[in-house]
Image (tube, helix red, strand yellow):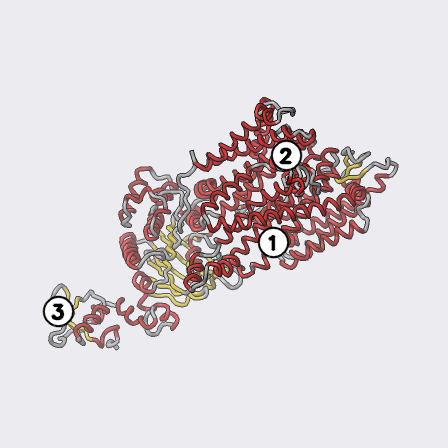
């Protein structure tokens, strides 16, 4: 197992333990705590929401990133870049809030915000990765007589996807955070105990929610790092 | 000889005055045409017109009698080898896979591809152990050979080479140059080569083209372009003060030999040697004439005054 | 080569917003979404003027950028003014709480038009600078001239003006304080991280882990954690620390801003090319001189970029401060969410976004000025 993955995975497990109903009632004997099965079911819907939203965002982001780096989409390069930069100025919480009136309480505004946050880093990451493909290799591919589709499939994509992992990681991290904020718009996520805790002045639930959210985020991050450890062969940077 | 590549009335406009203007050039079949010129003169652009990586704003390029604008660029490019200074090997493919790209695209059988790859690696003196390596683990010279092998893989009739030996040391460079000369001799391919090395240009070219600021300044055989009468810029580019010596290297003893007896004790030289070798021998022995031999027997004399055809008139 | 041009596609989207969706909505009060009204019903023949200006801007956009910008600004101005003018007649005979709000078509139109303006101004450097100013001037004229007064956002604003101004000021102060806290903490740590590779590894990992924690969790966790701390060391309470309010918001925001700042310092200090540093050493410069004459100036663009990222993050994250009682624009957003009042949400959210974009733009300008030698 790769070493960098060990730390978040361990932290995640530790925090999950602290968040459990048993641990919380030990720490706050007289407070009302959330029981472990309820936390687990919230964690499940949190993860499901994050995966769906981030998944759609990632697919869209890669597709758009590849599109604007083709000659067909070339004029869109700069508008998309400025739009992505502007979108980073919108914090996840504000995105959820803005989607709320349009889509009502529940999971929908959260998914919308999640898609946005999955899309932006992946889009920028894809553009950056396509641009990192050595010019000479592209030139050679063209001169050899590869069709644009063959260049994309055989030259660009194999060189691009290994570079996408940092962007995917940041998309997943953002998805975990945004899903938590989704609780404010009525989505059932691990943000829910935090919101309840804030409303009821219940420190125990506040802590449980925070620890569980962080635990899930760490576990997801560790899983991403683990996946990154498995991909390695080939695709080494060209020295020239 | 029919023109394999013909540039007719070509202009390329990149805006701000850069590009090519009024290019007319015939490259005969089997020629090794060397393009020389200052940086930015348009050599690469001229070469990239042939495989349609650059599109002319005026004029036509014909390849084997057909206007290339009417041909499918993909199919056109598969029939043209292209080797460049930055090599452009695919970093995610091994050496063998890089060489095999075009044959694989053309749907060759696996066995035939392996045979071809092995043969090319042998021809270019690439260690077979390199076949499974990725490009990042090659030296500059090795990578350029692989690039050359890739360009040659599908046995194209036309080869475009843009400073293909740019990043290697002089010794490897000379070896690669000899290999290229051998390939040209043996296969009779039409080759377009860009180089900044005047010695290389004069040694390899059957047709030498000098470019400056988007135009062709002069074209002809190396002998024609090294003549005293040539344009001063051309002479400067091809060797400056050292040009007379380079020219002697292109001339053969056979062409300056006269019947008759040389001075006593004169050293001997073979009729096929270059006049530069003759000069070297004269300097070494303090002689002003040499005995010219052919297959071991004397056929005449070479006098200092006859070097470079000066005694002829 | 075939390409997909930008302006025609955006213009089609803007037209879709103009013609395809509800432009305005009339609601009996501010908490319901009301009945949708098409742009024809709301703006009458002004729709044609807006559409014409929009379409006319497309073909002239690449060659006459100034003219295209003018046409687009005019389209925007007419659309806004006509919408504002449409509201009072619609409200006639309705109860006083009734509102005319912007519909989805309006927002789509507005967003795509802003994109088109940016794109139209792109070819000319002078235009890129003047166009935003002209746009701002036009919006200010419409707003302060009272042309938009009857629209629900303006009504909401009038009802909340003092509260909003306080929140905005507080938001800026809190963000600046969080940034200052982050600078004080992490710039020295960055310097240390650059000097000691062990420190770099440990700090980098730690701050990277903080970045993974969702902001809501960190804001939430700080309250019980601070509570426990204050129970253990009551003296801290006298020093001004609290479990709710500004304290947790400042700490959490500063922690998040830490990573970009810290990394910017480490990377920036290392930006000086090795051979340059060696040349300086060869000239006999002390390592202190090298730091000040080489590393700091050469790292400046990176420092500034990381400062910009951290500042924008602080402004955005401070929104969550509204949740822990720190106030600021976030408090308005949360109030709006709790009431499901669109206008109130917008009233809190738009200033956050505009503030972040404004600071981002200004700092980019400063970066461009200071790093001119980099071309
Ligand atoms: N795609 C392009 N777009 C715009 N200008 C170009 C392009 N390609 C080449 N040029 C310009 O055209 C001129 C000729 O370029 P070219 O690459 O053909 O020169 P060259 O003779 O090969 O130079 P070098 O010896 O440095 O390789 C240069 O001024 C160059 O900047
Ligand atoms: Mg060149």
SS at mark 2 in the image: helix
Query: Could you say which disc has been placed on residue C364 in the image?
Result: 1
Give the left or right position of residue C119, taking residue B313 as reference: right
Q: CA distance from mark 2 to mark 1?
A: 45 Å
Q: CA distance from mark 3 to mark 2?
A: 115 Å
Position of the C terminus of chain C by quadrant: bottom right
Q: How many numbered badges does the structure rendering display?
A: 3
Q: Does mark 2 fall on the same chain as mark 3?
A: no
SS at mark 1 in the image: helix
Q: Nearer the viewer, residue A109 or B194?
A: A109
Q: Assess whether mark 3 and mark 1 are in contact (beta carbons under 8 angstroms).
A: no
Q: CA distance from mark 1 to mark 3?
A: 83 Å
Q: Residue at x 55, y 34 (%)?
A: A217
Say which chain tag 3 marks: B
Give x and y (percent) for residue A206: 63, 31
Say which chain tag 1 marks: C
Q: Nearer the viewer, mark 2 or mark 1?
A: 2
- Ligand 1 is within 8 Å of the C-beta of the residue at disc 3: no
Query: Could you say which disc has been placed on residue B298 in the image?
Result: 3
Residue B287 seen in the figure: yes
Q: Does mark 1 fall on the same chain as mark 2?
A: yes
Task: Please give the residue where the numbered disc 2 appears in the rendered image.
Answer: C231
Give x and y (percent) for residue C228: 62, 34
Q: Upstream in the sequence, badge 2 or badge 1? A: 2
Give the left or right position of residue B217, taking residue B155 as reference: right
Q: Nearer the viewer, mark 3 or mark 2?
A: 2
- Residue A230 location, quadrant: top left
Q: Nearer the viewer, mark 1 or mark 3?
A: 1
- Ligand 1 is within 8 Å of the C-beta of the residue at disc 1: no
Give x and y (percent) for residue A181: 63, 34
Q: Residue at x 86, y 37 (%)?
A: C96
């Amino acid at each position: 197992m790769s070493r960098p993955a060990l730390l978040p995975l361990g932290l995640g497990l530790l925090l999950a333990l602290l968040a459990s109903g048993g641990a919380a009632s030990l720490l706050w004997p007289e407070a009302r705590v959330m029981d472990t099965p309820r936390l687990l079911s919230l964690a499940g819907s949190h993860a499901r929401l994050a995966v769906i939203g981030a998944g759609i965002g990632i697919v869209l982001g890669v597709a758009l990133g590849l599109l604007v780096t083709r000659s067909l989409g070339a004029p869109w390069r700069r508008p998309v870049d400025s739009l992505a930069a502007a979108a980073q100025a919108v914090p996840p919480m504000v995105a959820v809030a803005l989607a709320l009136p349009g889509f009502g309480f529940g999971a929908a505004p959260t998914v919308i915000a999640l898609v946005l946050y999955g899309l932006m880093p992946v889009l920028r990451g894809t553009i950056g990765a396509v641009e990192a493909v050595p010019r000479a290799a592209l030139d050679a591919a063209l001169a050899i007589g590869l069709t644009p589709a063959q260049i994309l499939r055989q030259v660009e994509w194999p060189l691009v996807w290994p570079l996408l992992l940092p962007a995917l990681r940041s998309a997943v991290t953002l998805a975990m955070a945004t899903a938590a904020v989704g609780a404010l718009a009525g989505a059932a996520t691990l943000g829910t105990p935090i919101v309840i805790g804030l409303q009821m002045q219940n420190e125990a639930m506040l802590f449980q929610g925070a620890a569980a959210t962080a635990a899930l985020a760490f576990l997801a991050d560790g899983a991403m790092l683990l996946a990154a450890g498995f991909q390695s062969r080939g695709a080494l940077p060209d020295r020239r | 000889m029919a023109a394999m590549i013909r540039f007719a009335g070509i202009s390329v406009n990149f805006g701000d005055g850069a590009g090519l203007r009024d290019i007319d050039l015939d490259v005969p079949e089997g020629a090794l045409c060397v393009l020389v010129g200052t940086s930015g003169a348009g050599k690469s652009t001229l070469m990239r017109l042939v495989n349609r990586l650059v599109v002319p704003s005026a004029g036509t390029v014909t390849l084997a009698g057909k206007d290339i604008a009417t041909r499918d660029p993909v199919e056109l490019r598969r029939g043209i080898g292209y080797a460049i200074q930055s090599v452009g090997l695919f970093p995610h493919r091994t050496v063998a896979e890089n060489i095999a790209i075009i044959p694989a695209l053309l749907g060759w059988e696996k066995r035939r591809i392996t045979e071809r790859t092995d043969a090319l690696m042998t021809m270019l003196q690439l260690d077979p152990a390199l076949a499974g390596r990725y490009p990042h683990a090659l030296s500059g010279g090795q990578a350029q050979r692989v690039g050359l092998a890739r360009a040659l893989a599908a046995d194209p009739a036309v080869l475009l080479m843009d400073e293909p030996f740019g990043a290697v040391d002089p010794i490897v460079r000379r070896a690669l140059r000899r290999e290229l000369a051998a390939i040209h001799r043996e296969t009779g391919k039409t080759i377009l080569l860009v180089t900044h090395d005047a010695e290389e240009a004069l040694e390899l070219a059957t047709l030498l083209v000098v470019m400056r600021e988007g135009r062709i300044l002069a074209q002809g055989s190396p002998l024609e372009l090294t003549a005293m009468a040539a344009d001063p810029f051309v002479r400067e580019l091809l060797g400056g003060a050292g040009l007379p010596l380079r020219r002697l290297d292109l001339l053969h003893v056979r062409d300056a030999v006269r019947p008759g007896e040389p001075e006593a004790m004169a050293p001997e030289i073979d009729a096929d040697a270059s006049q530069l070798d003759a000069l070297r021998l004269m300097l070494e022995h303090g002689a002003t004439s040499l005995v010219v031999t052919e297959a071991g027997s004397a056929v005449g004399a070479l006098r200092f005054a006859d070097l470079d055809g000066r005694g002829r008139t | 080569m075939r390409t997909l041009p930008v302006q025609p596609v955006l213009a089609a989207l803007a037209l879709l917003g103009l013609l395809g969706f509800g432009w305005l909505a009339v609601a009996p009060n501010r908490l319901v979404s009301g009945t949708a009204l098409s742009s024809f019903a709301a703006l009458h023949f002004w729709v044609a003027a807006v559409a014409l200006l929009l379409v006319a801007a497309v073909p002239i956009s690449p060659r006459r950028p100034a003219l295209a910008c003018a046409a687009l600004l005019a389209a925007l101005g007419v659309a806004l003014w006509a919408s504002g003018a449409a509201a009072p007649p619609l409200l006639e005979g309705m109860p006083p709480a009734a509102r005319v709000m912007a519909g989805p078509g309006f927002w789509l139109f507005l967003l795509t038009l802003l994109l088109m303006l940016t794109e139209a101004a792109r070819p000319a450097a002078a235009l890129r600078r003047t166009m935003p100013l002209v746009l701002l001037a036009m919006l200010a004229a419409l707003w302060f001239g009272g042309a938009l007064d009857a629209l629900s956002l303006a009504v909401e604003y009038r009802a909340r003006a003092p509260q909003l101004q306080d929140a905005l000021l507080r938001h800026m102060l809190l963000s600046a304080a969080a940034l200052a806290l982050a600078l004080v903490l992490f710039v020295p740590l960055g310097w240390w991280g650059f000097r000691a590779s062990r420190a770099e590894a440990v700090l980098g990992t730690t701050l990277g882990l903080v970045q993974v924690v969702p902001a809501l969790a960190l804001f939430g966790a700080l309250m019980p954690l601070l509570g426990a701390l204050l129970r253990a060391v009551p003296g801290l309470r006298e020093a001004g620390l609290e479990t709710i309010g500004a304290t947790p918001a400042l700490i959490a925001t500063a922690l998040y801003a830490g990573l970009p700042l810290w990394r910017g310092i480490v990377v920036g200090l290392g930006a000086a090319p090795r051979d340059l540093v060696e040349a300086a050493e060869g000239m006999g410069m002390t390592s202190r001189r090298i730091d000040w004459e080489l590393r700091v100036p050469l790292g400046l663009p990176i420092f500034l970029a990381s400062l910009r990222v951290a500042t924008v993050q602080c402004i955005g994250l401070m929104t969550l401060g509204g949740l822990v009682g720190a106030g600021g624009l976030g408090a308005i957003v949360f109030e709006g969410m709790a009431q499901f009042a669109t206008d109130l949400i917008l009233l809190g959210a738009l200033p956050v976004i505009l503030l972040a974009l404004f600071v981002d733009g200004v700092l980019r300008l400063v970066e461009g000025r200071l790093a001119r030698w980099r071309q």
